[in-house]
Every structure is written in C-alpha cells, then in structure tokens.
C-alpha cells in the first residue's frame, strides 16, 4: 500500500469520529489506518470497533496507557506502507491530503513531504491560516516545486514546524536510520523532527493547508502542563547529541544555543506553578549562571 496512517488515541471520543471519517474518505484509497488505543477509558474503543467493522483498512491495536511516543512507535513498527503519515485523533485531514502529499513525495523522490496547517479554534469555531510556523511561509518560493536538502534550511531549521502530522515519511528511510520517537519525555516531536531532518536526503513541500489542527482555548497554562516544561532541558540535550552525531553542531552552534536559551526563557516566563518555576530557574542558572 502507498501510505500507513498512524493515529495514537487516548480518551478523544469527542473528536475521534471526525478524524476517522476524514481518513476513510481520503481520495487516496490505497492506505492502511493504524489506530493505537493507548488505554482509553472513554468511548474511544467503541468508536474504533464500529469503524473497523465497516472499513477493513482500519487496524486497531490496544495497549495500556504508555504515552503518545510509545503508541506512535508501535505504529511505525506495524506499518507496511511505502510512506508513513501521522494524525492526532482530535485533528482531521482534508480528504485530498494524503494523495497530494504522496504525489508530491513521488514526484521529487522525497524522504519527507510536508504541507501547511489549518488551525481550528475549538472554542470559537474559527479557522486560521496566518501563522507562518503553520503555513510553511518560512520557505520562500525558491523551495516550491522541487526537492531540496535540509542543509538549505540551516538558517531557519529550528523554526520549522516540528509536528509529525503535516508530513509523510518514506518508511524505508525511518527504518534504515532507526528513527523513532523518544519515549518518556514530553515535546518529543522536537527531537523526532530534528532527527528526520538531519538524516534526510531530500524534502519537498506543499503550501496548501491540508490538515486541520484543533487548538484548545487560549487559557492559562495548568499546573500539570507546567511540570511538562521541565522536559525542554532534556529535549535540547538530545538535539545537541543528534547534531554532534552528524558533525553539524559546530556549523550551527551559535544558532542552536541562541534558540535553546530563547526557548527556555520563553517557557520560564509562562510558568504558574511556584515549585516548578523554582526548579526550572535552578536549571536555568546552572546553564547560564546569570541568575
């Protein structure tokens, strides 16, 4: 088959039918849809069962709750498609998404083919395609209608949208390079994106917004989310190791270190939990010594 679409699912019954409908109605029919139920306790398992009964392309795997990275990695190992795509279960795809990404990838023999993102505000019901991070506007016209190498993006590589669900990846490329999502940390997309980019030989883009991202209401960061932000320190350690592994670190060290510092300070200012903020500040001071 042409594409394996991997969906990690955990208690997203409110949105799951919308997501699955967008996949079974894809104009590219030669796909498999691998659903990994990560220990859901809502009505997600029943929805998955119903859809699997009416569409044989849907494969449902169930595991105890282990997190999104584990679920995605299970999907990668299970996939049989020429290319692998991802979608989160509270998001959905334009019905032409995977056909267009696949044709783009085949035209330019790309390891990675990516598209723009349409942001849906779940609270207001409004759509937006103005965020340059989501719309791939970082890529000027020179990058369109051709394949390019990641080295052409070194001037903005850390500003490229890190999410895996606006891209498809050549499965052989992922397997041969043993690229999987890091487990046991949050913000794993950042590490995965860096690893696929610096190992890829060719990329191509479609600026058309073909995937719909459901953004929750713009509320204050919760206490639980604050704890997750501590993982940014580990994320940057892993990214630095990856860059050094391909002898790229020295070439973009200043850019990497500035991105690291700006990101860590940005999230520090967002923290609400006093205990987490104290620990976060301690780690910042150990890195920069200017506290």
Image (tube, rainbow, N blue to C red):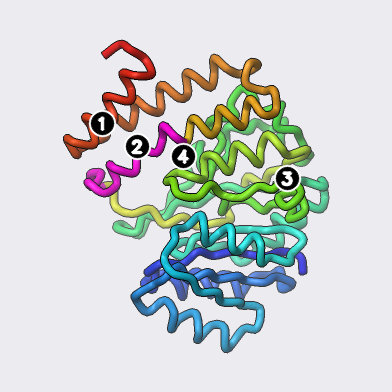
Looking at marks 1 and 2 on the same chain, the residue that comes earlier in the sequence is marked by 2
Q: Position of residue 18 (x, y in %)?
A: 47, 72
Q: Nearer the viewer, residue 129 or 117?
A: 117
Asked where in the image residue 204 lies, by quadrant, the reply is top right
Looking at marks 2 and 3 on the same chain, the residue that comes earlier in the sequence is marked by 3
Label 4: which secondary element: loop
Label 2: which secondary element: loop
Q: Disc 2 versus disc 4: distance between alpha carbons?
A: 26 Å
Asked where in the image residue 98 lies, by quadrant, the reply is bottom right
**Which one is in front in this view, the residue at disc 2 or the one at disc 4?**
2
Q: Nearer the viewer, residue 29 or 261?
A: 261
Q: Position of residue 145 (x, y in %)?
A: 76, 41
Residue 237 seen: yes
Q: Which residue position is annotated with label 4?
A: 131
Q: Is residue 286 above or below residue 76?
A: above
Q: Which residue position is annotated with label 1?
A: 279
Q: Which mark is residue 63?
A: none
Q: Which residue position is annotated with label 2?
A: 230
Which segment did they paint magenta?
219-234
The outermost residue toward the left is: 274
Q: Which residue position is annotated with label 3?
A: 177
Residue at 45% over, 72% down: 16
Residue at 63% over, 58% down: 85
Q: Main secondary structure of the magenta part?
A: helix
Q: Is residue 14 above or below residue 111?
A: below
Task: Kindly indicate whether the residue at mark 3 contacts the one at mark 2 (C-beta within 8 angstroms).
Answer: no
**Which one is in front in this view, the residue at disc 1 or the one at disc 4?**
1
Q: Nearer the viewer, residue 100 or 113?
A: 113
């Amino acid at each position: 088959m042409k594409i394996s679409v991997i969906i990690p699912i955990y208690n997203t019954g409110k949105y799951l039918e919308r997501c699955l409908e967008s996949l079974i109605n894809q104009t590219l029919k030669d796909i498999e849809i691998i659903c990994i139920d990560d220990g859901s306790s809502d009505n997600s398992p029943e929805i998955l069962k119903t859809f699997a009964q009416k569409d044989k392309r849907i494969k449902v795997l169930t595991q105890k709750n282990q997190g999104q990275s584990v679920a995605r990695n299970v999907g990668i190992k299970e996939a049989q498609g020429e290319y692998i795509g991802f979608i989160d279960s509270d998001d959905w795809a334009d019905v032409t998404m995977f056909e267009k990404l696949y044709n783009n990838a085949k035209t330019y023999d790309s390891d990675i083919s990516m598209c723009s993102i349409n942001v849906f505000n779940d609270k207001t019901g409004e759509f937006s395609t103005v965020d340059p991070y989501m719309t791939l506007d970082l890529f000027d016209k020179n990058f369109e209608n051709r394949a390019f190498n990641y080295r052409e993006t070194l001037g903005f590589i850390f500003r490229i949208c890190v999410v895996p669900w606006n891209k498809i990846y050549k499965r052989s490329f992922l397997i041969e390079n043993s690229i999987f999502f890091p487990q046991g940390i949050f913000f794993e997309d950042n590490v995965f994106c860096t690893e696929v980019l610096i190992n890829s030989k060719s990329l191509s883009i479609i600026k058309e917004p073909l995937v719909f991202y459901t953004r929750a209401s713009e509320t204050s960061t919760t206490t639980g989310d604050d704890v997750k932000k501590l993982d940014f320190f580990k994320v940057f350690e892993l990214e630095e190791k990856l860059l050094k592994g391909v002898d790229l670190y020295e070439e973009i060290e200043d850019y990497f270190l500035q991105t690291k510092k700006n990101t860590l300070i940005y999230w520090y200012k967002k923290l609400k939990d006093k205990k987490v903020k104290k620990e976060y500040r301690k780690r910042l001071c150990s890195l920069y010594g200017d506290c």
